[in-house]
Amino acid sequence: MISEAPVSWDPNIHRFEPVPILKGRSHSSPFPTSAFDVVPQLDLNAFMPLSFNHVRNIFDEVLPRELRLQIFWALIKLYEEEHERLVCSGKWTALKAASSRNRWVGRDRAMRELVKFSRVSKTWRSLVFDGQLWEDVDLQAFAKLPALFLARLAENVGPFVKHLDLSGHTSLASNTLVDMTNSLCVRSAPTLNFTYTQLTTVNLQGCTNLSTQSLHGLLIRSPFLRSLCVKGLGAVTNATFDVLALCQHLTSLNMNRCIHIDGEGLRALGAAVLSRGDCLALKELRLSGIQDVFDDALATLGKAAPDLEILDLSYCSSLHNSALAALVSCTEEEKHKTKTISLTAREAGMVVRDSRRYIRRVTALRHLSLSHCSLLTDIACSNLAYALPRLEFLELAGIGGELHDDGLVKLLNTTPLLRRLDLEDASSITDAVLSVLTPVKEDDSASGGDVAPLHTGHALEHLVVSHASRLTNDGFSALIRVCPKLRFLEADSTLVSGSVVREFVCTSRERKIKDAHFIAVDCRLVGENVVKDIMPQTRPRRGWRSWEARKLGYLDGRDGEDLKVGQDECDEERVVLKSFYNWQMVDAVKAARDRKRKATKKLRNGSSEQVSELEEGKWTSRMKWWTPSRRSSGNNTPGLDDGDRDGCVIM
């Protein structure tokens, strides 16, 4: 039953009206029961989250692993190509290279960014350190890497590594190298305990903390080794030669400045290979500074290494003329096993009355360095004549006045492919040496359709004759005019004059030879006027654009520095001319940069003051040296302020 609302009669309108119901007494508190009661209630539908479709991670969930590795590999190549393109376009400048942002470029920057990707996730970490991306481990630019990173890197990449370059890692410890060797090894078979690496190239130059045991452990487990550089390591001993005798594929060995090796170790290496009826595969052998190298060691080397192309025996104080004769000597029984040549006594540099025939081995040497071997004379050159027909680089610096024309001319006459010759400190040589290096013109030597024979000097590019005071300007001029490829001529402390310098610069510009050099330090006949005349075509130094060259302060024309002084040192078309006056220009550029830096600093600090009169006077005096009216530098030499003239004190 539905209850009806109460009504009452209203006499004014003569009808019934509903009676209003009043609210009863409230017994609740006027304060809210909760702090949240003051917040008005709203429609819940207004706060419903929006629905989005789930974005699928295609790279990690869809792409196969090999394709993801190819993407990382393409990223590395992209960094390399980007830097090459920047260099080729001419936008790579010295200031950009000196910036901290460009400290790592090319592949080094790519590998650095690749390691950063390993922080994304565990999946990316496994991709970054996949061995397929680390076949070439070149860490030369990161010499301060911790040992823990090196050990983990070797553990992750495993036996994929074929090229290992740790040069400059002076803190590399022996135990770290042992751990890396174990990680790089692959087992020959599951049932065998013998393990080996797949390394073909190893460079440990500068790793001075290594022990002999750790080094030998790496070499023994590297049967496929082709190139090894252990320059300057104290861990290298004669026992290292015995270990290397097992590396049958070794073609390049650099043991320069290893103080614990001598000629006996070298002889043992060759004897061990010959005893098993085999030959060394060596094509490059560098043993600068090796001690006690005698005839038997080089005789064994000549027999055991018939394919040797590069031999460095510089700074061997015990090396004698007879040892080089033993290197190319050959007996009647051995001449059928190798290519030989039969010489008369005159051709062999012996006594003319001797009627015997001398058999010499025709070697494959292209580069021979005998610099600073104090016991050698030009007789050594006579002993090598006719045995080095492929010789391209010959270094005989520091031998001194014992190097005369006779033996040297005999050797040079039999080396038509010679490209570089270093005769520094050969004070006894004369124009006869320059004459044999000057090729005959083709018009004079060839007639009709006959092909002219190769003459020594036609391929000459680099010549050093510093301190050869008996050479004349006529010999230099003839050499410069006829040698078509000559681009480097060093003639310190000689009688070369300014006319020869001018001719070399003009000839190099006509031939469009890049990076040509003429070094004429301490040449009194090269005057200031000549240097000024050819200044638009020369530069004082050969600049290069790199982070490592930032402190050398090369002046690069691409940077657009408004110094109003100096020459573009990075322009390959300019000839590098080194003399007393050119070095002053380097000081002038440095002074101009200091002045510009001080002015910029004052402007940055809000000061409107100009450079002080004292500084302006110094700058003006520096610039006077290059004014055409000046005949000598005197006290106005750039960079020689009063405060800097205390270098030489007469006691």
Image (cartoon, rainbow, N blue to C red):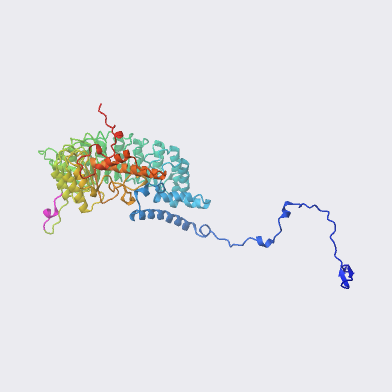
Query: Residue at the spot x=42%, y=56% of the render?
Result: 74
Q: Quadrant of residue 177?
A: top left
Residue lying at the far left of the rendered structure? 353
* Position above or below: 612 against 515: above
Front residue of this view, candidates 37 and 393:
37
Residue lying at the far bottom of the rendered structure? 14
Q: Quadrant of residue 356?
A: top left
What is the quadrant of the C terminus in the image? top left
Q: Is residue 177 magenta?
A: no
Residue 202 position, x and y percent, is 37, 44
Residue 61 position, x and y percent, is 53, 58
All told, the count of numbered labels is: 0
Front residue of this view, candidates 547 and 110:
547
User: What's drawn in magenta, residue-wise?
Assistant: 439-447
* Position above or below: 8 against 522: below
Front residue of this view, candidates 300 and 373:
373
What is the quadrant of the N terminus in the image? bottom right
